[in-house]
Image: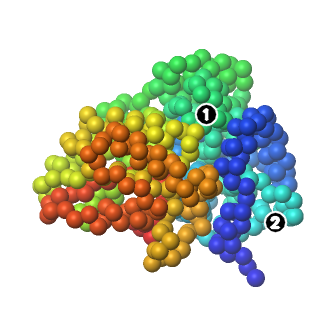
Amino acid sequence: MARSYADAVAALNTLQSNHQIVEALRKNPRLNENAIPEMVDFWTTVGYNTADLDRLNVIHIAGTKGKGSTAAFVSSIFNRYRSSLPATSDYKIGLYTSPHLRFVRERIQINGSPLSEEKFAKYFFETWDKFGSATKPVYFRFLTLMAFHTFISEKVGIAIVECGMGGTYDSTNIIPSPVVTAITSLGIDHVGMLGSTISEIARHKAGIMKQSAKCYTPLSNQEKPGAEAVLEEVAQSVGTELTWVTTMPDLAENRTKLGLQGDFQKENASVAMTIVKEWFAKKEPETPYDAKFRTIVSDGIASARWPGRCDTRHEGNITWCIDGGHTLESIQLAGKWFASEIKHITTLPSVTAVKIYLVFNQQTRERNASGLARALYDTLTPLLPQAISTALFTPNTTFSPTSIIKRTAPDLISVGTNPDEVDKLVVQNELAATWKQLDADARVEVKTSIEDTAGVVRDDVVEEGVQKVVLVTGSLHLVGGVLEILEG
């Protein structure tokens, strides 16, 4: 009997979790040193050698924040270019990204669309069966192997590959000769694995640099203490050229529209445009970078979509402002974006007043959840016209045990958290206590599911003309659950 997509997701969720790996590495960082040799061995087991990856003409992207958005811009530009080619063209673009929001197949895309359930199951079990009764790779490594196998099988000609965590020891870093690499904005994250300083983190991210490929990074990274020296040092040691990217004039002056909201996306879009130009210069130099091509690039930037990043959804008298920010800088950027959305909403003629809500979670304790909540409060307080009325804290559990849906989507099972802490709502109670200290007048509640949290907002009665505006942030897994509640 054929094995289904549901069978594939169920099997995937049995693999050793990211949480277990992070804990093991925190106790013994030297385990990292085996990461790439182990991935090469796994790749051989699947039936390939690393040289096969060069057939994919890879664009490899690392960074603390913005790497997913940059990958989305690059993918959108290439797909816009693909649509300009004759219908008979077999030009295929692959995108591998993480984490997923609603469906795990979102991580592996071809020509701008997630794999179908049928193709996901096909390539999943082709990879799975290669290991037989042997121990399978852990969750993220397995998906990386599967993505590469999928792209080669589908004869993808361009693969945009986003690092999962770090760079040097990231499972994607078995690509021997990418066409171009990029390191997006740097910040403090995953300190247990990458270090507690920008220079330490920069060294990990710079591990994707290869002699075969120029590397591009935003000029803003020069302002991060120690980052510039480390990136330049690594570039010189591997024999590649490092280019600092400034914001493109058309973006800075708003002549090119951004498909992703937030002024900070101008930096990511500029890096994406530079990446694309370099890729064509190396792989298709006969394609002129003329006015027609620049229009394709601009259209690709304008048509880019990346759910869960500065994403606004409307539901009756509720505006959901959703952003997966989960580091200090990305939380602050999310706060500034939310304040700009509030400012816009208050100018609408149909709106007499707003009532502001926060839905927040940060399940990874190493990120100092309470510190991120304080940073968000400090960012929002001087920018909002009034205080947040209700702050709601929830784990990443999507559905209530008593839900009429009566299911937990297997795609939404988080493999990056401590199950015991989730069950006891440890982080959520800490966050609630922190917010009460910050704002004693706010209504603060801890809920046990995202569905129940959304119910609080939906059931809150307000006068006619009052718009309920909700900021959802702190975790991409939280964002995925909210989108499932809104769209599922």
Question: Sequence order check: which comes first, mark 2 or mark 1?
Answer: 2
Q: Amino acid at mark 1?
A: Val
Q: Which residue is mark 1?
A: 191
Give the residue displayed 25% in from the left and 57% down from the top. 468
Height in image: 207 above or below 120?
A: above
Q: Residue furthest bottom?
A: 1
Decide which of 402, 252 is in the foreground and name it.
402
- Mark 2 to mark 1: distance in Å? 35 Å
Decide which of 52, 134 is in the foreground and name it.
134
Decide which of 258, 39 is in the foreground and name it.
39
Give the residue displayed 61% in from the left and 55% down from the top. 420
In front of the other: label 2 or label 1? 1
Q: Position of residue 440 (x, y in %)?
A: 29, 43
* Colour scheme of the rendered structure: rainbow
Q: Amino acid at mark 2?
A: Asp
Q: Which residue is mark 2?
A: 129
Secondary structure type for disc 2: helix
Give the residue displayed 66% in from the left and 23% down from the top. 235
Decide which of 470, 443 is in the foreground and name it.
443
Is 109 on the left or on the right of 308, as rendered?
right
Binning the other alpha carbons within 10 Å of mark 1 as few (below 14), some (14 to 19) or many (20 upward) gives some
Residue 325 shows which numbered tag? none
The quadrant of the picture occupied by the N terminus is bottom right
Q: Quadrant of residue 387?
A: top left
Q: Position of residue 96 (x, y in %)?
A: 61, 51
Give the residue displayed 64% in from the left and 35% down from the top. 192
Cβ–Cβ below 8 Å for labels 2 and 1?
A: no
